[in-house]
Amino acid sequence: MRDWANWAIDTAKVRGATFADARVMDIRHRDVSTKNGEVGNLSESESLGIGIRVIAGGAWGFAATDRLTREGIQACAAEAVAIAKASALAKTHDAVLAPEGPHVDAWQGPFIKDPFRIPVERQIDVLLAADKEMRRVKGVTLAEGSMSFRRIEQFYASTEGSAIHQLKMLSGAGIVATTFAGSEIQKRSYPNSFGGQHMQQGYELVESLDLVGNAQRIAEESVALHSAPQCPEGTSTIILESAQLGLQIHESVGHPIELDRVLGMEANFAGLSFLTLDKLRTLRYGSDIVNVVADARLEHGPGLGTFGYDDEGVPAQCTPIITNGLFTGYLSNRETAAAIGEKRSGGTMRTESWANLPIIRMTNISLLPGSWKYDDLIADTDDAILMSTNRSWSIDDHRYQFQFSTEIGWEIRNGKIGRMLKNPSYSGITTEFWGSCDAICSREHWTLWGTPNCGKGQPMQTMGTGHGASPSRFRNVKIGVAFAK
């Protein structure tokens, strides 16, 4: 890998590049799924190649190849420089990078059991056992399970002298029970919707989830939802459990703080942002207890947004995004940092593969824990709706007005959790919603959730992000019914 990267860097310099970096990536995928007692999908693939970025004539150029001979890599680097020189003819300003010293290092994410060394038959057996437990429950129409594994080995080099080797192992798993009754569909997912839980761990993550042990419970809840009353409509206090709050953070905090969206450099798939530059350190984003960080460091947790260095060779950092309710930070890269008066990149450039340009992406965007014990929070709440596990969401292209629905809800009356509710939804305006937060549970209730399928860019790149949260209470929120008959 080192030789391939060095060939690319040397060629780019000879061809006239003032800056160049190269990323060699070896990516291995395994995806397994089951459906109603049968294997639904089984795929395994590997991709190896190099992506080369350059600045020449003050403009960017990029090219990538999987032809990893000296001739192939040199031709690719030459093409990247030629693209940059052509782009320079139409540039409006020179590309300027915030300074970053050279880094020579190796970093590996934490994992105990390599999932690619676990026989796929054993993984299928676990999913089929969970599938069987779900289908034992009368009324279950569709039982599904999935596992997903990624092994990413990468070498990064630049003309500034960086040489960084990283290895990441990403794992995820989940199950879903779906029930059809008349014209109504209900579903319950474990441990989260949209593929379950995903973290930077090995097969030990799957074992810790105990899919088989939780299968009967979620199946029974899916069936019970059909006879549950609808969520009431109106204005109410709500408590969001941590997985739902993770997606709320993703959509109403994570995307609008991407500085390329703010500056109008990127609008695909998630629009622009209401967080214009004048709002930095002036906008009241939430209540005084709301503190959000963008933290790629391993000490924050083994999330999908955890790494040693980003794809510009910048070390992982923790950036305060919301501090005691005040908006205090963006996700930046080396080119955009100057726009917010920073002398250094926030270290958030990431790429899906060697064939794609790195772009600003979420790392682990997390709501820091508060001080409440969960039982105390429930006991302190007279009249509210507890909502769990996302079912759908919608948010405008500036990330300001939103609506979310969850798979299940429960009434809270006089400090006790009561009857189950179906089809709950809530809506609001981003800053008003976060401003209504008056209680956040403590670290013991905090979970770092993984979102493996965040899409951005054109061509689209799918990236994993992390979102830590603990159950939290919000006052005076508009609630209603989603998926009504």
Image (cartoon, rainbow, N blue to C red):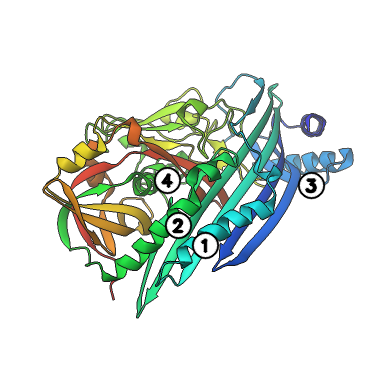
Whether residue 342 is situated above or below residue 229 in the rendered picture:
above
Determine which residue is flagged by label 4: 255
The one of 100 and 179 positioned closer to us in this rendering: 179
Task: Check contact, mark 2 vs mark 1: CB within 8 A.
Answer: yes
Q: Which quarter of the figure has residue 71?
A: top right
Determine which residue is flagged by label 1: 131
Q: Earlier in the sequence, mark 3 or mark 4?
A: 3
- Front tag of 3 and 2: 2
Q: CA distance from mark 3 to mark 1?
A: 39 Å
Q: Earlier in the sequence, mark 2 or mark 1?
A: 1
Q: Secondary structure at mark 4?
A: loop
Quadrant that contains the N terminus: top right
Say which amino acid is labelled 1: Asp
Q: Earlier in the sequence, mark 3 or mark 1?
A: 3
Residue 177 place in picture, x, y as percent: 44, 64
Q: Earlier in the sequence, mark 3 or mark 2?
A: 3
Residue 215 has which mark? 2
Mark 4 closeness class: few <14, some 14–19, many ≥20 residues within 10 Å = many
Q: CA distance from mark 3 to mark 4?
A: 32 Å
Say which amino acid is labelled 3: Asp
Tell me which residue sits at (54%, 41%) in the image.
205
Mark 1 closeness class: few <14, some 14–19, many ≥20 residues within 10 Å = many
Determine which residue is flagged by label 3: 66
Q: CA distance from mark 3 to mark 2?
A: 43 Å
